[in-house]
Image (cartoon, rainbow, N blue to C red):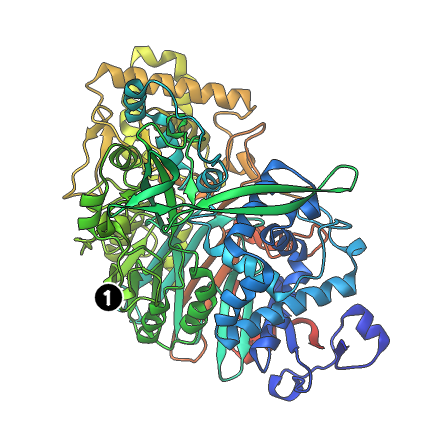
Amino acid sequence: MLRFTCLAVAAVLTLSACSDSNDSSDILINSAEFSAEIRRTDFGIPHITANDWKGLGYGHGYAYAQDNYCVLMRLVAESSGRSSELMGETTARNQADFLQRFINGEKESFKEMVVDQLPQFAIDVAEGYTAGMNRYLRETGVENLPEGDWGCRNEPWVFEFDSIDYWMYLRKVALRGSSDQGIFRNALLSVEGPGNPAPQAEGAGMTLLADSDALRRAAELLRSPSQGSNALALGRDATKNGSGLLLGNPHQPWFGDGAWYQSQLTIPGEYNVAGASLHGTPIIGIGFNKDLAWTHTVSFANRFSLYELKLNPDNPLQYDYDGEWRDIEQQTIEILAKQEDGSMATRSYTFYTSQYGPVINLKNEEPLLDGWPMINGSILAFRDANLDTGPRLVEQWVAKAQATDLDGYIDALATIGNPVFHELAADRHGDAFYGEISAIPFITQEQLDTCVNGLIGPLLAELTTNVIVSLDGSDPFCEWGTDPDAPAGSNLYSSGKLPQIRTTDYVGNSNNGYWLSDANNPLEGFPTIMGPLGYEGTQQFLRTRIGHLMVAERKAATDGLDPEPLFDFDNLKAFMYSNRVYGAEIVMDDIMTICNTEAAEPVLPACTALAGWDKKVELDSRGAQVFLEFWRVIRDELGNSFQNIVQSDEFWRVDFDAEDPLNTPAGIDTTLPANHARVISALQTASNRLMEANVALDAAWRDVQVLERNDERVPIHGGAGTAGIYGAISVSLKEGGYINPGSGNSYIQVVTWDDSDCPIADVILVPSQSTDPTSPYFADQTRLYSNKEWVRWPFCEEQIAQQQIGETLLIEE
């Protein structure tokens, strides 16, 4: 039975409050299976209190549903392996369903093998979240659900789901960096089985494979431009008051899968944490408690490996392992697919599996890797390090949130429930931490040096800068190892063997590997598998460089933000919104030198726009669009797109120096005529693109980059991280400008402490809380961000009471 605490029918129908009390211990209901209190503060942030984990999930799920029900409903439908059945057949849906059914199995077996093995609190919070979502659907009705781009009114794929469906979605969250990457989804679903002929002309094929641009492009797909981040954790030696200070700045999608939702979740005496969770997840992902704050940046350490299986010439369903033939198993998956007339058709797909995992085919990325066998008599299998990380995710994030200092936080990381993130944290005592503590397969450098052999393995490693690693599947030495301190049976590295720093100074990360997370004390001596993106001694992102350089300037008080050195709460917020374009800072003088030559006369308007530009992406900056399009041309020609750098021995005036990685490479070599021609050509292309998009070369940035919210155009400061802009915004040029960014600065938090028990936190959720166009929380924080304003988080009880909007909602069933 569903109840509110008061019995007035009108109150029930309007979901209004039934008590003015803010003493949660007096008003929570103890007899129901699920019960929770929901209060909202400014900008619609819900504060949920419950006596237990079921109630906490229940209140969280209900509050989330009020703002974004359709987002999670869509994700659950897609994760259940029933999207073609519920939404109608498409090739993409069929493929997604085949893969989800293959990974998860049937619901009963998934429950037994995965869910039943979880700690009870994790089971409870998911059951509660599911119940809260379903309650909202029953009360609202499918005919009254939100409309709009993320709506689902009257959609046939809306249904009351159970906690097993929900756990399938949570498991999928952990696979975003491995099996759920587009390149490997395609590869897993492109296997035709034995007899599929390999490309002809073996010798020529090998030569073409060695020069493959397709594989380079395939590797780039593993580094999604919408998945990035910046983070700084500052210790007592870097702050004015000696307390810790943390900046969290994830660059996640703004809407849908991977976007953020703000809340505070409390079980008195057990769990009290505030911040943001990924859409539809039941616990806080990036956040803070009374004593500790943490954040993440996306890591591109290897989450998988391939294995090359040498086939039996007499039986293509066998492969060599240590001199013996082992069988390849087959598993056929069937799904239902709704047809246009409403009828159901059955579709099937056969997966082939080895001891390492399923067989894949990379023909979509490189046709020369097609065939069973391929041109060298082998096939490839795929092993995913994150298959069992998802169920550990909730356990780890709850343990982190319960920590009272860095010791407890670091202890929580031993669970290895982190699928794809660098960890950064600071506490009120003035300690700071960085760790590449995530799911990384136990493959040693000796194994990499020995087992990446033959023809295809070394080529894949070279062409993808060690992002795709293929090991020798015939040699037992090449199996993933066992770390006794890692989760049992995981074959992952344990937390103690992964790169990490504890400091009283600072650590920062902007998605490069671990190497320069403390720019003054590089982490070195780790295998490439732990950080192929900006590995030890290699060129770093422009965004990585500007982040560390701005820290050095702030510590020396040379940045103009504050006449006093070191960081405090206010100057860290100004640091975040500085909007410098570091790419322009290191090349603009040389561009102007070339602009002053006679040959540059055709691009004089572009040169004039750049000459008047402040080298920032503030709303009143003029000319930023010329540089961003210019730099895009340079990157297209000279960029290593996966490493996210401009890599050229000809372009740079000062080449990369591993002894000075933050300041090199720099400048354009203007002594070379080729660079004059290159710069002028790039400026011309940039001008043409902008004119075709009807964007004036000197237009103010506020008129060029906007997010459309109903009939309002909200100006968005920040810009492309690839140009060295710390506050990254991801959007491509289209008619009228950079319209409707899809990712970038998303949930931002700055957290510190004073002598009180209440943490001091200013936050902003750039796309705002709700995806419902009729909600008051659809664009309110977006406007704040546009004005460089923040939301002060009310964490303690008296603060929540003071900021509460509306009445307290008590729900139970």
In the image: residue 59, left or right of residue 786: right
- Whole-percent x, y for residue 484 in the image: 26, 68
The amino acid pointed to by label 1 is Thr
Between 543 and 396, which is closer to the camera in this rendering?
A: 396
- Whole-percent x, y for residue 774 in the image: 72, 52
Between 630 and 264, which is closer to the camera in this rendering?
A: 264
| Residue marked by disc 1 | 503
At a point 50% along the width and 39% down the height, the residue shown is 189
- Whole-percent x, y for residue 268 in the image: 53, 83
At a point 68% along the width and 87% down the height, the residue shown is 31
Picture layout, residue 175 above or below residue 663? below
At a point 41% along the width and 29% down the height, the residue shown is 370
Between 118 and 614, which is closer to the camera in this rendering?
A: 118
Give the structural element (helix, strand or loop) at label 1.
strand
For the question of whether residue 224 can be seen, the reply is: no
Report which quarter residue 426 is drawn in: bottom left
